[in-house]
Image: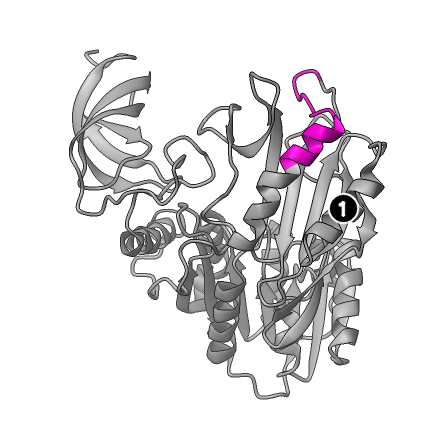
Amino acid sequence: MSKQQGKLIEITITDLNSTGDGVGRFEEIVVFVPDTVPGDRAIVRLVQVKAEYAHGKLHQLLQASAHRVRAGCIVADKCGGCQWQHIDYEYQLVAKHDQVIQALQRIGGFVNPPVDRVLTTDAPLGYRNKATYPLGISASGKVQAGYYQKGSHRLVNLNQCPVQDPRLNPLLAQVKQDIQQRGWQIYDEGKHQGQIRHLGLRIGRRTGEMLLTLIVKEWNLPGIEQQAQEWLERYPQLVGVSLNRNHHRTNAIFGDETRCVAGVSYLREVFAGLEFQVRPDTFFQVYTETAEALLQVIQSELNLQGQELLIDAYCGIGTLILPLAKQVRQAIGLELQPEAVEQAVFNAEHNGINNVTFQVGAVENLLPEMSIKPDVVLLDPPRKGCDRAVINSLLELKPPRIVYVSCKVATLARDLKFLCQDGLYQITSIQPADFFPQTAHVEAVAFLVLTH
């Protein structure tokens, strides 16, 4: 074989894959190359070679694609937080549209899926309302916070991040110094020793209220109450400082328990005209404005008349069900996490919405027990998609309409294939949405109607 590890080859990049790498061909094999753009002609070093594909590293750019731009971040070529800062934003949207179509065709078997243009709002930078940074120690002993270098566990130290809400940047730089001065030990995952694992920052885009959370191995952090009070005084928009305990050897960021040490345990955010309480470990869409725009698409497509019964499976803290509940006769939310349901109940009461009830449990257990037939079922599962028992329950319940909100188009395509088998359901439209500009990640909502 003429292709071997370490060899330099010349290729032209023709496509992007679902993880954001450029794709080219060399002597009948596919080569995946990070940091490239379709239209690039490049010298690439092969770093991993298999029988049918290889992974390469950009060695020299011979001719730049028309879609290549200067990254808006000085560490974009090192940091693993974004994959696509070197790609112009309009082309990012084209690539995400293609990604949705390819998944539906390849995995779902849909020949000509009705995919709309990618929904986006006006800020491809400075949009993230939440950031969680792993912490580390530099060679000189300085506390660092940032993201891991692509494909490694080497930390790229950041004092600001162009994709997060810029109001969070002052905290990122200063809090590291405070941790250093306090002498708090940074967690070493190899040895499972040390104390502080991650720094979590969160902001209400509409209210400006902020939360600061330290994810720690154990609760005992000497002087944390005093330091937390200093942070509240220094940053007027900071409303709460919390500790979250994660004492396991794990890649999961948050542990099961969070304690507020100063201020309040939540921030207030306004979403779709409603006020929500959002805690440090609450799931809430990271791009508030695009999530709101997507909700408007859902409302427009459903055209609710006020007489419907709506079930929201995987309802979380009520982000989608509460605005929709104002347009239906009755709404029922299903959610596995008791803490999320507790927040959803509060958010409903706080906003005076009294036609919604919530049930705690796994959707695959709750949905088959439904004694009433819903008019609309809203699905918003995690990345792994719906459990097959959920799909089977829907095929038995036969709700006239299904709205499937997906954060991973591969599992969306798989589940839509099951729902549309035998022609029972038909897809009327699919709306992709860009919740994560500068990355390869794309969300999508599929609208289905019962055909018979």
Does residue 37 appear to the left or right of 338 in the view shown?
left
Question: Would residue 338 be counted in the magenta stretch?
Answer: no
Extreme left residue here? 63
Which residue shows up at 36% across the image and 62% down it? 118
Q: Which of 315 and 288 is in front in this view?
A: 288
Q: Name the residue under label 1.
A: 230
The picture places residue 383, in percent across and down from the top left corner, at 55, 47
Which residue shows up at 52% across the image and 62% down it? 404
Q: Is residue 384 visible?
A: no
Q: Give the range drawn in magenta.
A: 176-191
The picture places residue 149, in percent across and down from the top left corner, at 46, 28
Compared to residue 380, the image places residue 52 above or below, namely above
Q: Nearer the viewer, residue 80 or 183?
A: 183
Q: Is residue 276 visible?
A: yes
Tell me the kind of residue under disc 1.
Glu
Q: Is mark 1 on a helix, strand or loop?
A: helix
Question: Which quadrant would residue 258 be assigned to in this image?
Answer: top right
Question: Would residue 181 be counted in the magenta stretch?
Answer: yes
Q: Nearer the viewer, residue 333 or 96?
A: 96
Compared to residue 437, the image places residue 27 above or below, namely above
Which residue shows up at 31% across the image and 34% down it? 35
The picture places residue 394, in percent across and down from the top left corner, at 60, 63
Question: Which quadrant would residue 40 be assigned to in this image?
Answer: top left
Which residue shows up at 70% across the image and 15% down it? 191
Which quadrant of the rendered structure holds the N terminus?
A: top left
